[in-house]
């Protein structure tokens, strides 16, 4: 039987029972109405009986008053007339009583007539002055008879009313019992219907909904009773089951597509896309937890020769074998990726860096060598390691430095691991690792591969942005963003540092004009190599460039910049200062500080190296060194800038020590000019909107 037919039958049964209950209710109401009408009639009859009794009593009192004095000769005509009128009214009232016309009321009507006749005779005799003896006795007998008749009639009517009331109550009781039984039956039917719907309709529907919303391919299917049902829910269950199968297949297909898009088809390792996401997320997590991690770049040595010897099938088998070794050697917390070709990368999360990376590198090299001995197919790889954030503060720099370490390992003889910041690289290996950059640097300027980023400096007393430092970046088309530490020394060695510095000065002057046009007349500082400070031709070029600046230009030099040619260097620095250029001593404390040079340098600002600032809130000695440096600089008439400020605790401590300016990631990271303009729009900028302040400073 179909589900709809069962529900329709139950509804019809409930409807019929409801109609029966309605009829029973109307019957009870009718009986109650009839009972109320009988009670009303009884009340009216009782009231009429009382009225007749009162009228009879009044009439008897008048007759008694008229006949009480037996000595009277005659009843006055007026009094006789009054008595006859009262008697007439009594007769009319009794004739109007419905009970007098009923079969049971014939005796009452006769008794009333006898009473009226006897009373009339008494009135007539009294009016004529006749003796009332016999007539009065007849009158009294008639009154007694009338009263007994009236009492009997009243008792009969009351008894009838009571009988009718009891009968009505009994009928109402039966009807009420029937109504209660019908209501209980209706409630029982509704409860059974609700329970049946819950068990046979709602339950299966809930199961279907759960099955439809759970698209996990491992989830159990629908229960067989639902699928085997012959009603509408069975059809729905089979349709949902089929639809769910389609959705599960689609989900599996999407997961497969997602896996293929993010994994290497040959080795089943994460590909470059997934690796980029995990590396970016790992940098964020490392910054939040203040921890380090290692990036290992692995390249198969002489893979082209192996591929040519074994063929592409053998080469693919070798790559799969290397992937298996990487999986078995690394732990679950390390991310392994095939970035392309014969290159693999690993992200190793550990607080014990670089020691943990060195252990992992040794294990990988040993495992690959053992696998090669077992299969008679030599497996040799080179590994380059970079540690975040020591060897790179962003994703691009970290990758590039790991690649440089990999080049170092290959140039050192292959089959080994090299660390970008380690001491295991010889000067020859370092030079070999930088050789590709040196060959490309000459054409990089002409191709426009260099750019400037700017890092703001904030004045601690006012929280205003006081100036910005220009930092040169190399956007390499293959290696990505290359940090200055990787190419500045190369530029100095191959004689490209002057061309690079002059380009930096001209670009900084152009960018400063944009800053001024946007209402930010900030001094712009440019780092100058110590090899150029004593160069007379470069000094003339620098003065010519800054003469066209829109504001104050500043130079950042190290304290050892004057060592090679002190006299020329001091002379040129004084020329720069006289031309309105500000001079800052950079990285103070990082090298061999010379107080003799320090007191002679015409510097406006001294920058404390980040090595002392980074541990200022955790070390006992660094705060003493920083405080003494601040006092020394102030005594020499210089302002002090602290580099590498990354925590609020360090900023607070430097402010208390009297440090004038701070610079670091806590204030802002280096950023391109467009981002700098957006950043300055949300900050307090010293001299913003006051274009005359620029010329005042430069004068």
Image: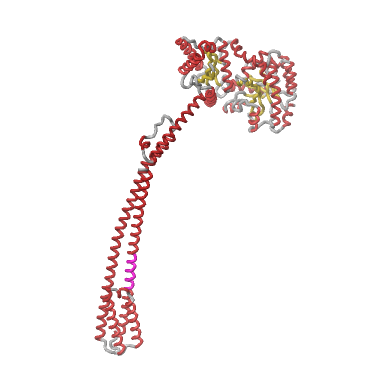
Percent of width and height locating residue 221? 39, 32
Quadrant assignment for the C terminus: top right
Q: Evaluate whether residue 349 shows in this view.
A: no
Percent of width and height locating residue 42? 32, 69
Percent of width and height locating residue 43? 33, 69
Q: Evaluate whether residue 99 shows in this view.
A: yes
Quadrant of residue 148 within the rendered picture: bottom left
Instruction: Name the dominant secondary structure of the magenta segment.
Output: helix
Horizontal side of 373 relative to 463 (left or right) equals left
Percent of width and height locating residue 695? 74, 28
Is residue 41 in the magenta section? yes
Quadrant of residue 297 within the rendered picture: top right
Q: Is residue 241 above or below residue 393?
A: below
Q: Nearer the viewer, residue 224 or 171?
A: 224
Residue shown at 65% from the left, 33% from the top: 681
Horizontal side of 282 relative to 206 (left or right) equals right
Callout count = 0
Quadrant of residue 625 within the rendered picture: top right
Residue shown at 36% from the left, 53% from the top: 18
Q: Nearer the viewer, residue 445 or 246?
A: 246
Q: Is residue 140 above or below residue 166?
A: below
Is residue 485 in the magenta section? no
Q: Is residue 619 above or below residue 5?
A: above
Quadrant assignment for the N terminus: top left
Q: What is the span of residues highlighted in magenta in the rendered image?
A: 36-49
Q: Is residue 153 above or below residue 487?
A: below
Q: Nearer the viewer, residue 398 or 273?
A: 273
How is the rendered protein coloured? secondary structure
């Amino acid at each position: 039987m179909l589900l709809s037919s069962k529900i329709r039958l139950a509804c019809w049964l409930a409807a019929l029972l409801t109609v029966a209950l309605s009829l029973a209710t109307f019957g009870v109401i009718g009986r109650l109405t009839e009972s109320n009408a009988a009670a009303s009639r009884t009340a009216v009859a009782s009231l009429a009986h009382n009225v007749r009794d009162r009228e009879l009593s009044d009439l008897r009192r008048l007759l008694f008053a008229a006949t009480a004095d037996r000595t009277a000769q005659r009843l006055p005509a007026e009094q006789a007339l009054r008595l006859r009128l009262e008697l007439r009214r009594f007769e009319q009232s009794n004739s109007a009583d419905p009970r007098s016309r009923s079969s049971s009321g014939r005796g009452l009507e006769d008794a009333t007539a006898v009473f009226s006749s006897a009373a009339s005779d008494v009135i007539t005799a009294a009016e004529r002055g006749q003796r009332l003896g016999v007539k009065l006795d007849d009158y009294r007998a008639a009154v007694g008879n009338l009263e007994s008749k009236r009492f009997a009639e009243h008792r009969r009517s009351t008894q009838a009313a009571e009988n009718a009331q009891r009968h009505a109550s009994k009928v109402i009781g039966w009807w009420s019992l029937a109504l209660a039984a019908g209501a209980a039956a209706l409630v029982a039917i509704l409860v059974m219907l609700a329970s049946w719907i819950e068990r046979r309709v709602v339950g299966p529907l809930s199961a279907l909904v759960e099955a439809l919303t759970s698209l996990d391919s491992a989830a159990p299917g629908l229960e067989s009773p639902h699928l085997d049902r012959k009603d509408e829910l069975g059809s729905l269950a089979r349709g949902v089951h089929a639809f769910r199968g389609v959705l599960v297949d689609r989900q599996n297909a999407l997961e497969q597509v997602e896996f293929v898009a993010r994994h290497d088809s040959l080795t089943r390792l994460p590909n470059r896309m997934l690796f980029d996401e995990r590396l970016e997320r790992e940098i964020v997590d490392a910054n939040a937890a203040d921890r380090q991690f290692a990036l290992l770049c692995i390249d198969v040595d002489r893979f082209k020769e192996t591929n040519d010897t074994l063929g592409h099938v053998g080469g693919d088998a070798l790559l799969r074998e290397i992937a298996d070794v990487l999986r078995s050697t690394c732990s679950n917390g390390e991310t392994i990726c095939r970035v392309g070709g014969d290159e693999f990368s690993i992200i190793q999360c550990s607080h014990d860096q670089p020691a943990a990376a060195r252990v992992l590198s040794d294990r990988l090299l040993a495992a690959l060598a053992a696998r090669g001995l077992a299969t008679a197919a030599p497996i040799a790889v080179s590994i380059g390691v970079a540690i975040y954030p020591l060897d790179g503060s962003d994703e691009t720099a970290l990758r590039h430095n790991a690649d440089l370490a990999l080049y170092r390992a290959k140039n050192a003889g292959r089959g080994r691991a090299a660390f970008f910041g380690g001491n295991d690289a010889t000067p020859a290996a370092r030079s070999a690792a930088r050789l590709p950059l040196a060959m490309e640097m000459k054409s990089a300027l002409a191709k426009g591969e260099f750019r400037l980023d700017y890092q703001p400096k904030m004045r601690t007393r006012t929280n205003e942005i006081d100036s910005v430092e220009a930092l040169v970046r190399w956007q390499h088309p293959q290696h990505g963003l290359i940090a200055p530490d990787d190419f500045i020394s190369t530029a100095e060695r191959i004689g490209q540092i002057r061309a690079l510095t002059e380009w930096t000065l001209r670009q900084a002057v152009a960018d400063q004009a944009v800053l001024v046009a946007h209402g930010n007349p900030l001094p712009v500082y440019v780092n100058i190599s110590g090899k150029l400070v004593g160069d007379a031709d470069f000094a003339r070029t620098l003065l010519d460039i800054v003469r066209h600046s829109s504001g104050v230009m500043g130079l950042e030099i190290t304290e050892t910049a004057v060592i090679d040619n002190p006299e020329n260097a001091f002379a040129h620095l004084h020329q720069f200062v006289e031309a309105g250029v500000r001079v800052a001593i950079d990285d103070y404390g990082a090298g061999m500080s010379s107080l003799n040079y320090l007191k002679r340098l015409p510097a406006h600002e001294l920058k404390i190296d980040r090595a002392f600032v980074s541990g200022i809130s955790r070390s006992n000695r660094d705060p003493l060194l920083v405080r003494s440096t601040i006092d020394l600089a102030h005594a020499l008439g210089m302002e002090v800038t602290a580099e590498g400020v990354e925590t609020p605790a360090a900023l607070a401590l430097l402010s208390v020590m009297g440090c004038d300016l701070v610079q670091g990631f806590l204030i802002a990271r280096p950023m391109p000019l467009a981002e700098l303009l957006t950043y300055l729009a949300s900050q307090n900028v010293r001299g913003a909107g006051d274009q005359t302040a620029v010329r005042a400073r430069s004068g």
